[in-house]
Amino acid sequence: MTAIIIDGKEIAKKKKMEIIDQVTEMKKQDFTPGLAVILVGDNQASRTYVNSKQKTAKELGMHNVLIEYPSSITEHELLAKIDELNNDEAIHGILVQLPLPAHINETNLIEAISPEKDVDGFHPLNIGRMMTGQDAFLPCTPYGVMVMLEEIGLNLEGKHVVIVGRSNIVGKPAGQLFLKENATVTYCHSKTKDLAVHTKKADIVVSAVGKAGLITADHIKPGAVVIDVGMNRDEQGKLCGDVAYAEVKEKAGYITPVPGGVGPMTITMLMYNTLKSAKNHLNNLQNSNI
Ligand code: GUN
């Protein structure tokens, strides 16, 4: 069996067209969704991600601001900037690119962002809302995975999903989103004994570890759906995921490539969250004028 490739780039393109239409409508009311991105230090990978976010926001007609600081900036100064952005009427989404230099406490910054502008979905209030099934900003990568699966028309009810990786950004929230769709979820991580015993039972495997070649054909049940969230470099320096793509593609039912799979969806869902926040803001403005 050769797997059907889930084309994240194509799905993202479709979703972005929907966002452009909605931004265009909003602009007719003299209202433009705005995203502010804070980048600290000179981490090249972070700069590349931030540039893509800026470029996409621009493409979609959003107002976007990049605020850059040297790694010598203090936590106090960053908190003051976040406070200013929380009160800025033109900004509906605030994102602090992670990781941050060691002297800055990430949690303090995340918790300082207004939950109404937390388009990354990292604030504890949004995480709590997500876990209790309330309306929330969902973390962009797992959200993008769910949208991809919806696009291929996969019914998740009763499916066994094995999540490999338990980060706050991807693994943990991904499990919650699958649970909400009535899937049965197993979490695996670096201390799991015999990973393949678990993944081989899965209808859907989501790997979000950051280790090239971790998931081989021996880890996969024939016909399973394989979602690769990994973003690594192989020995030749080429971008690759966690999944040994060439061999797993011959055994899986569906597979996401790297690049061109989950990556484009993450940025698209960030834009979707920014649009959602802007809509909320506009509704509040309109209601307060009644
Ligand atoms: N660093 C790596 N991924 C992300 C992300 O989704 N959001 C932020 N803010 N930082 C990141």
Image (cartoon, rainbow, N blue to C red):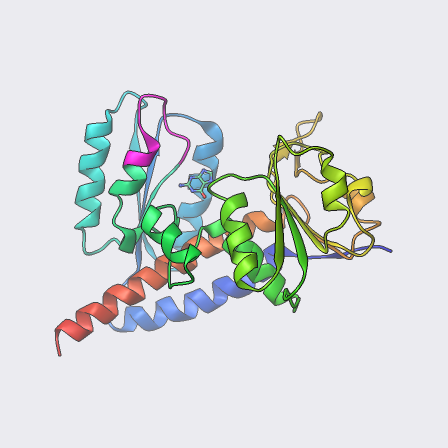
Residue 100 falls inside the magenta stretch: yes
Q: Residue 193: which quarter of the image?
A: top right
Q: Residue at x 43, y 65 (%)?
A: 19
Residue 79 pos. (x, y %): 21, 35
Say whether residue 192 is left or right of residue 59: right
Residue 135 to residue 251: above or below: below
At which x and y percent is residue 219?
77, 42
Q: Look at the picture and state if 233 lies above or below 10.
A: above
Q: Provide residue 48's location: percent of width, then percent of height.
A: 47, 36
Question: Is residue 31 something one can see in this rendering?
Answer: no
Q: Residue at x 24, y 64 (%)?
A: 281
> Which residue is the extreme one toward the right?
1
- Quadrant occupied by the C terminus: bottom left
> Which quadrant does the N terminus fall into?
bottom right
Residue 191 lies left or right of residue 29; in this view the side is right
Which is the main secondary structure of the residues drawn in magenta? loop
Can you name the residue that lies furthest to the bottom here?
290
Magenta extent: 98-108
Please tell me which residue is depicted at 39% across the width and 70% down the height of the picture: 22
Question: Is 148 one of the magenta-colored residues?
Answer: no
Q: Position of residue 226 (x, y in %)?
A: 70, 50
Q: Is residue 189 visible?
A: yes
Q: Vertically, is 197 above or below 15?
A: above
Report the front residue among 180 and 76. 180
Write the residue at 49% across / 49% down.
Answer: 173
Say which of 92 and 135 sits in front: 135
Within the displayed image, which quadrant is ligand 1 positioned in?
top left
